[in-house]
Image (spheres, rainbow, N blue to C red):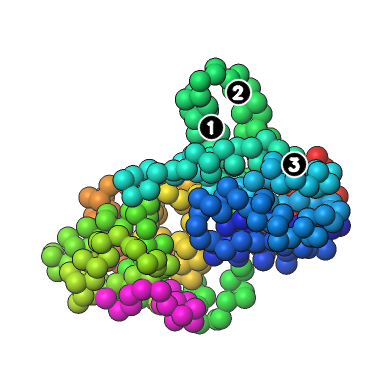
Amino acid sequence: MRALLLSAYSAVSHQFWAEQVMAHVEADWTTLTLPPRHFSWRVRSNPLTWALKEHATLSQPYDLLLATSMVDLATLIGLYPGLGSARKVVYFHENQFAYPESAQQVSSVDAKMVSLYSALAADKVVFNSAYNRDSFVDGVRAFLKKMPENLPAAARLERLRNNAHILPVPILPATVLPTFFIPLSCGLPSSNRPARVIWNHRWEYDKNPEDFFTALYTLSAEGVPFELAVMGQQFRQSPEVFEQARERLDAHIIAWGPQPDSDYKALLGEGGIVVSTTWHEFQGLAIMEAAQRGVLPLVPDRLCFPELYPPEYRYDGSVEDLQRRLKTWLTNPTARPPLLSTGGWEWPQWQAAYQRLLGPLSQP
């Protein structure tokens, strides 16, 4: 089976997914990717970029065409009609209809339309979580109501929802991690460094760092002991709260900023609590990766988290409840929940499903 994988905005998580799919699904893979920068241009111009640079590759026959949702699949097939004979699968890591708009960034209409056209052009549509699927379909419905015409789209959107597949981005098995990063006993309270609080997300406003640091300011003022490791991907322009927090929480900080891979994994392996305060998450690989290493996740009761984390690992989404739960976990070891079992997130649990969906015996 000849397969072409297209990723128009190859961010870290997208790259990880693509590499693992090609490693776990048997096929003769060819891949075309574009770097994760200039988002608005990238999402609108990827067919033209590839047509001008990769004409020979796109002109080949393929049995499977696997594209991320930022690929303008409909336009690409228009430019290369031969691609239309392949089975066409679109994978949604995220969707722009659920992107939180603010003064800093407004969600792109072009990006929304590209993903919608791609979903309609595909034979199969795959989401990494039910929340991603539902927020996409509901977002499209609300978006279409703004158009001048009263389009009869409801029935088709519900068919898309009902026919969509849910396949998360699996994480690598714990058995491939260095042994000193693997929790010795699942089901027992974490004893690595229970007072180490970890932030390991992108340094952008949609991850809502303000709530995270506000809770820590209160804990610090109350004299609650904790260490702080703030890691994750940093950009040329990051929210000002990071510099403010670096000054106000200096006495607690043991790591700040992006870390070399080995240092990052070591810090996770000694972590106690990993926190999310995000307004924008469809799966959350960073939290999963930390939980796999024995760090207790504390996530808001919104977005994709209710389908992935039991109630004992979720707070109600407010700063007050986050601060309360953190204080309890930091000061009362017996109140901490057990380590979270993460085996269900790993590749061995999902390889057969990916193979059935993408493999040569896949049925329409």
* Mark 2 or mark 1: whose residue is earlier in sequence: 1
Occupied quadrant, residue 245: bottom left
Q: Which mark is residue 140?
A: 1
Direction from residue 109 to residue 153 in the image, left or right: right
The residue sitting at 21% across, 75% down in the picture is 250
Observer-nearest of 181 and 93: 93
Is disc 3 placed on a helix, strand or loop? helix
**Proximity of marks 2 and 3: CB atoms separated by less than 8 Å:** no
**Proximity of marks 2 and 1: CB atoms separated by less than 8 Å:** yes
Q: Which residue is mark 2?
A: 153
The answer, for residue 342, to whether it is visible in the render is: no
The residue sitting at 67% across, 35% down in the picture is 120
> Which of labels 1 and 3 is toward the front?
3
The residue sitting at 30% across, 60% down in the picture is 239
Q: Quadrant of the N terminus?
A: bottom right
Q: CA distance from mark 1 to mark 3?
A: 23 Å
Q: CA distance from mark 2 to mark 1?
A: 9 Å
Q: Tell me, yes or no, whether the highlighted magenta stretch contains residue 260.
A: yes
**In the rendered view, would you say 120 is above or below 315?**
above
* Mark 1 or mark 3: whose residue is earlier in sequence: 3
Per the rendered image, the range of residues in magenta is 253-269
Direction from residue 87 to residue 12 in the image, left or right: left
